[in-house]
Amino acid sequence: MPRPRHLTAESRCYFVTANTHGKTQALAEREAAQIVIDALYHLRSLGRIRLHAFVVMPDHFHFITSLSEGETVSRLMHSLKSYTANEINRRRGERCALWQQGSYSHGIRDERDMVARVNYIGDGDSSGGQDAALR
């Protein structure tokens, strides 16, 4: 069997996960989940990311992305989590922590790793995701 092709630095993809604060079901409502989805699409439309796949679960979300030149996962997640927390809190009339501090990112190593991560997302994280999109 041939070895999987490794991704170059220019095409590096990341599997990223963010959890809600206290693993609450903050994204179980369709409107909250849609805010996260819309924010991902907005980042894509700005050219900050190339969005390959995502799933939004009641208490976390995953996505696979390639970053634009000069973009970092840390800066991207700060923007994404800040905007979505503010927007969800505004619509709910609340002022509370929405996201757990930090996030998890995994640099995808090769095609086999990518397929495994896309399949994981496509399965809705095996626990009933609100929305999954594969691009």
Image (cartoon, rainbow, N blue to C red):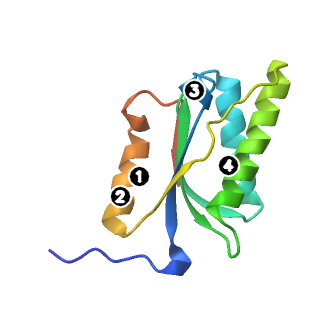
The Cα atoms of the two marked residues, 3 and 2, are separated by 30 Å
Residue count near mark 4 (Cα–Cα under 10 Å), binned few <14, some 14–19, many ≥20: many
Q: Quadrant of residue 85?
A: top right
Q: Residue at x 33, y 54 (%)?
A: 116
Q: Are marks 3 and 2 in contact (CB under 8 Å)?
A: no
Q: How many marks?
A: 4
Q: Which residue is mark 1?
A: 118
Dot 4 lies on which element? helix
Give the Cα separation between the discs numbered 1 and 2.
5 Å
Q: Give the residue type at disc 1.
A: Val
- Secondary structure at badge 3 equals helix
- Whether the residues at callouts 3 and 1 have beta carbons within 8 Å, the answer is no
For label 2, the residue is: 115
| Element on which disc 1 rests | helix
Categorize mark 3 by other alpha carbons within 10 Å: few (<14), some (14-19), many (20+): few
Residue 134 x/y as whole percent: 50, 50
- Amino acid carrying label 4: it is Leu
Regarding mark 2 in the picture, which secondary structure is present there?
A: helix
Residue 40 circle label: 4
- The answer, for residue 41, to whether it is visible in the render is no
Observer-nearest of 102 and 7: 102
Is residue 99 found left or right of 103 in the rendered image? right
Q: Quadrant of the N terminus?
A: bottom left
- Could you classify mark 1 by the number of other residues whose Cα lies within 10 Å: few (under 14), some (14-19), or many (20 or more)? many
**Cα distance between the residues tagged 4 and 2:** 21 Å
Measure the alpha-carbon separation of dots 3 and 1: 26 Å
Judge depth for marks 3 and 4 and give the one in front: 3
Q: Pointer 2: residues within 10 angstroms few (<14), some, or many (20+)? A: few
